[in-house]
Structure formats: C-alpha cells, structure tokens
Amino acid sequence: MTATIVDGKTVAAELREELAAQVTAMTSDGIAAPSLSVVLCGDDPASAIYVRNKGRAAERAGVRFTLHRPPAESTTDELAALVRSIDADESVDGILVQLPLPAQIDEDTVMACISPEKDADGFHPYNFGRLAEGHPAVVAPGTPLGCMELLRRSGVTVRGSRAVVVGRSAIVGRPLALMLVNADATVTICHSRTRDLASVCKEADILVAAIGRPRMIDASYVKPGAFVIDVGTTPQDGVVVGDVDRESVEPVAGWLTPVPGGVGPMTIAMLLRNTLALARARRALVQV
Ligand code: GUN
C-alpha cells in the first residue's frame, strides 16, 4: 500500500474560491464585505510571514484587511487598549492577534480584549466552551477546522472510527479532539506522558500528530490504511519539517497529509471562513 497524499494546497485554493464567491454575493446585495483586523506586535520573522500570507489571502477573497503594527516594546496595557479599540470599532468583523507576543506582554490579558463575536481565531473561552458542549459557535480554531475539512473532502467516515490525537495544545490537539468527538469518533488524546504511545497510536483509524517533534511518528505508530494527519511545523535548516516520518509512514498509511502543503494552507482558508461567518452573524444581528 502507498498512502494517498492529501493535497491541502489545492483544497485550500478551492475553499478560498468558494469563500470569494460568497463574499461577492454578499457585497452585490449591498452588504459590506467582511473585515479582518490583525495585530502583529514584535519582530518574529515567522509571524511576519504568516501575517503577510493571511493579508494576501484575505484581499484575494474580497475580505477587507487591516494590519496594526504596535511597537515591539509595547506594554500589556498599551496592547490591551489597542485591541479594545479595534473590538469597539463597528466596521470590524474579525480580530486576530498574532501569537507569540513579545515576552513582556501577558497574552491572556490581551486575548481577553477580543469579544467572542469578533474572535476570528476561535480561541475565545466562550467559543471553545460551545465546542466542548457539542454545540459549536460560529467560529472555531482554524487548524483543527482545516483537519476536519481535509477528512470530509477525502470522503473518510469519521463516525464510529477510532481517532488518536497526539498533542494537547489549546489551539490544535484539544479542539480537534472535541471536533472528532462531535463527529462521532471514539477519541484518545495522547501527550508526552502517555505510556506505550506507539501501541495506542497503532489502534487509530485517524491519527493526528500535533506534537512539534520532527519526524517522531514512524511506521511503528501507524495502523495499515490509517488516515494520518501531520500538523507539525518545525523549522529545520531553512525548511519546515512535520511530526511524521514520511518515508517510513507512506508505505503503511492509507492517506497522509504532507508537510508542507497539507494542513498548513487550510488554516488560512479557515480563518477566512471564520471571518465570513462572524460578518454574517453580525449583519444578521444588525438587521434584526
Ligand atoms: N501563531 C501561529 N499560528 C497562529 C494562529 O493560528 N493564530 C494566531 N493568532 N497566532 C498564531
């Protein structure tokens, strides 16, 4: 067996076109286009690239994009005041504060200044809580949404399957496990303290690697025919490396999302979907 390589780049491009068509339909009805405001604070080069890509994708989809660049030496209070002012701006539908923030800034304080109705990342505790209850809000974190969309578009039956998520972060592992449960999978969350990790992973019909340890998952972790999702993105010698050892896993898995070109491009498409969903919800509220 050789795994089918899941082409996230192409799926994400299709999604962005679908979203662009929905934005065009919205604006031709005389409704304002969705707007996304991004706050980029600090000098992290990877963050600058991510934000540039988000801006390009937004503009191509017809989403109004505004970039705020507060100084790297901003204080928590200054950044919180900026985010509060963006949140209060009626013309803004979605806000994203690019992480990580500089070390002197308290991330939780700043993120708490984004209201759930403008939470383009889907990180707000209210939106996370809705997902945990099994009644998702209009938005959810983009990377796990992207993983679910890749499963859906690959025609995989999630209901009744065994899913193992390796990694318990608040922005990938935990929300993805909840999405899989909500889609009727039987889900196990593993982490650095899990005993006999390989044998747990080997039970998985759907195996998600979101650990941040380059090439850790080899064939000994993979059930033949499994759908393997690689969320890892560790920079190494100028290239981005996933958590899955592709050479080892490809002959065993049924499907494999590659790095790069798998989950990564889906995250931005899902950010745009979230922004459009927030705009629709806000317009509906305004029209009531
Ligand atoms: N930094 C890396 N990925 C993300 C993301 O999806 N959202 C935000 N806000 N920051 C990030």
Image: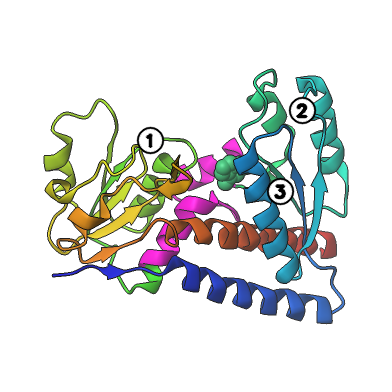
Which of the two discs, 1 and 3, labels the residue nearer the N terminus? 3
Q: Identify residue type, mark 3.
A: Glu
Q: Nearer the viewer, mark 3 or mark 2?
A: 2
Look at the image and say whether residue 130 sits in the magenta stretch.
Answer: yes
Q: Identify residue type, mark 2.
A: Ala
Q: Nearer the viewer, mark 1 or mark 2?
A: 2
- In this view, 220 is above or below 225: above
Task: Name the dominant secondary structure of the magenta segment.
Answer: helix
Q: Identify residue type, mark 1.
A: Arg
- Looking at the image, which residue sits at the far front? 237
- In this view, 235 is above or below 17: above
Q: Secondary structure at mark 2?
A: loop
Image quadrant occupied by the N terminus: bottom left
Crowd class of label 1 (few under 14; some 14 to 19; many from 20; radius 10 Å): some
Image quadrant occupied by the C terminus: bottom right
Q: Secondary structure at mark 1?
A: loop
Which of the two discs, 1 and 2, labels the residue nearer the N terminus? 2
Of residues 96 and 53, the one nearer the viewer is 53
Q: Which residue is mark 2?
A: 72
Instruction: Say whether mark 2 is within 8 Å of ligand 1.
Output: no
x 71%, y 29%: residue: 110
Q: Give the Cα distance between marks 1 and 3.
A: 25 Å
Q: Which residues are magenta?
A: 122-151
